[in-house]
Amino acid sequence: MRHFILIFLSAPCFAQTVREYASPDGKTTAIISTNRTGESRTESKSMPAGQVLLIHDQTSPDGAHGYGVVQAAWTADSVFFVAGTEASGGHQSWAHPIWIYSRDRNRIFELEKSGVTATTTFTLGAADTLRVRVSGCNGGPERAITIRLPDFSMNARIRGVACPPAK
């Protein structure tokens, strides 16, 4: 008589793709594992030791309420790692939340928590600047903004960019 053991694992547990982003100075690597539902988990590791510095897990238990990294890059000076995401499961398909990892502070900062929602992918510029289009204020048109990442990571606010409260 043969016995079979069936093991059921949820789909979000399986990493389907792994992308590594080495910082320009070679001191840190960001490793992004994306599962079959498109959701991502990012580890920041020191190099060459491989010590995990920070984990940013955007997966969800059901594979339909998390976020997947669709764009990622280090700044030229290796101080910031920026990731653009999109929602799994089809909710908020117009939004592309962006998070910023500050290597000096070993912390993640999210643009949405500052009152702006990115609607496109980003561009990194000189002097640690981030350029992106964001949703308009109170139903207005999208607008392009430029953020100095050192300023943003110091106070997690973007001056003069967030929408005023609707009246």
Image (cartoon, grey):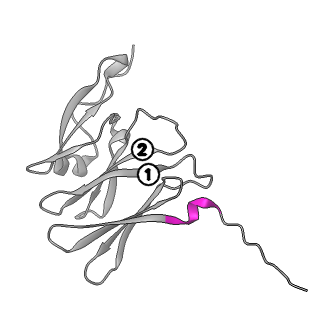
Name the residue located 37 percent from the left edge and 17 percent from the top edge: 139
Name the residue located 26 percent from the left edge and 62 percent from the top edge: 105
Looking at the image, the residue that sits furthest to the top is 167
Question: In the rendered image, which quarter is residue 41 located in?
Answer: bottom left
How many numbered marks appear? 2
Name the residue located 31 percent from the left edge and 25 percent from the top edge: 163
Does the magenta portion include 24?
no
Which mark, by number, is residue 101?
A: none
Against 113, residue 101 (above or below) is below
Q: Which residues are magenta?
A: 10-15
Q: Is residue 8 left or right of residue 60?
A: right
Looking at the image, the residue that sits furthest to the bottom is 1
Q: Position of residue 121 (x, y in %)?
A: 29, 41
The kind of secondary structure element at disc 2 is strand
Q: Position of residue 106 (x, y in %)?
A: 30, 64
The kind of secondary structure element at disc 1 is strand
Against 135, residue 105 (above or below) is below
Residue 57 in view of the camera: no
* Contact (Cβ within 8 Å) of mark 2 with mark 1: yes
Question: In the rendered image, which quarter is residue 167 located in?
Answer: top left
Looking at the image, the residue that sits furthest to the front is 1
The residue wearing badge 1 is 68
Name the residue located 52 percent from the left edge and 56 percent from the top edge: 59
Q: Position of residue 46 (x, y in %)?
A: 28, 76
Q: Position of residue 137 (x, y in %)?
A: 32, 21
Q: How many residues crowd around disc 2 within 10 Å: few (fewer than 14), some, or many (20 or more)?
A: many
38 or 84: which is nearer to us? 38
Q: Is residue 138 left or right of residue 38?
A: left
The residue wearing badge 2 is 86
Q: Which residue type does callout 2 highlight?
A: Glu
Q: Earlier in the sequence, mark 2 or mark 1?
A: 1
User: What quarter of the picture does the N terminus occupy?
Assistant: bottom right
